[in-house]
Image (cartoon, grey):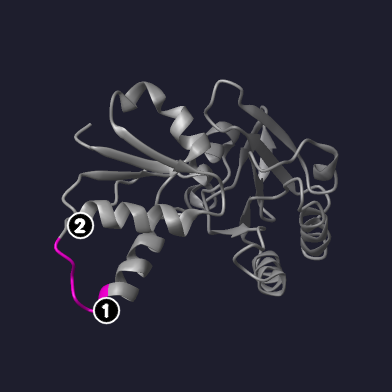
Amino acid sequence: MESEMIVGYKTYIELIKPLIEDKEVIFTDMRHEVERCIRSIQSALEGKIVSIICSGDPGIYGMAGLVFELLRKQYGDTVPDMDIEVVPGVPALNACASSLGAPLMHDFVSISLSDILTPWDVIEKRIIAGAEADFVMIIYNPRSKNRTDQIIKTKDIISRYKRPDTPVGIVRNAKKRNEEITITTLEDMLNHNIDMQSTIIIGNSQTFIWNGLMVTPRGYYGKRF
């Protein structure tokens, strides 16, 4: 790695320790994202090569957008004298889908249940819209120590529009050594372990379970046979 400074959430820094070597490392706990990005921008403007570490993909619930927001606020339409590269990663929805089978073969929506940055009434409207339109639904940040009711409310809302036997996949610690994979139904999903390390994929009306895998048809078979 060419980077001289590594910046990120403490947990993510721990995951890449073997790659850091003797580089300068700046880390904070959750809810200090703005401070991390401001520090990164300042260091980059001073001439350092800085890498901001995110989980999954930096452009999906990650830090890429915040960096651009801060630069826009500070510089307006003027482009600062630095190179910025967004390096794509593997988002949780892709990692979890591959562990479950092929649940995202048709249209889908992803919704975060964290109401720290988005009001719950807005999240609720998005849940209703996704469920009513029969999208496959990916649920990020379903439950934390302090947020226990949102996933219950979400299940109740979705149950108005989807059948109780709708397939549901729950993946904890996707693609890590301690990965946990559960395939269940909408009716039964709250009886399983769900926390902030979990991502939930709820099928559409065509999704089925085959040989322990969750599959959403794209429609090819019906057109060709």
Secondary-structure class at tag 1: loop
Q: Which residues are magenta?
A: 75-81
Residue 12 can be seen, yes or no:
yes
Query: Dot 2: within a 10 Å radius of its alpha carbon, few (fewer than 14), some, or many (20 or more) residues?
Result: some
Query: Can you give x and y, in whole percent of width and height, for residue 78 in the image?
Result: 19, 76
As for residue 113 lying within the magenta part, the answer is no
Report the disc number at residue 76. 1
Residue found 40% across the figure and 28% down from its top: 16
Left or right: residue 152 versus residue 104 is right
Residues at circles 2 and 1 in contact by the CB criterion of under 8 Å? no
As for residue 78 lying within the magenta part, the answer is yes
* Residue at image mark 2: 45
Query: Dot 1: within a 10 Å radius of its alpha carbon, few (fewer than 14), some, or many (20 or more) residues?
Result: few
Left or right: residue 120 versus residue 10 is right
Residue found 16% across the figure and 58% down from its top: 82
Residue found 71% across the figure and 41% down from its top: 195
Left or right: residue 102 versus residue 15 is right
Residue found 62% across the figure and 55% down from its top: 136
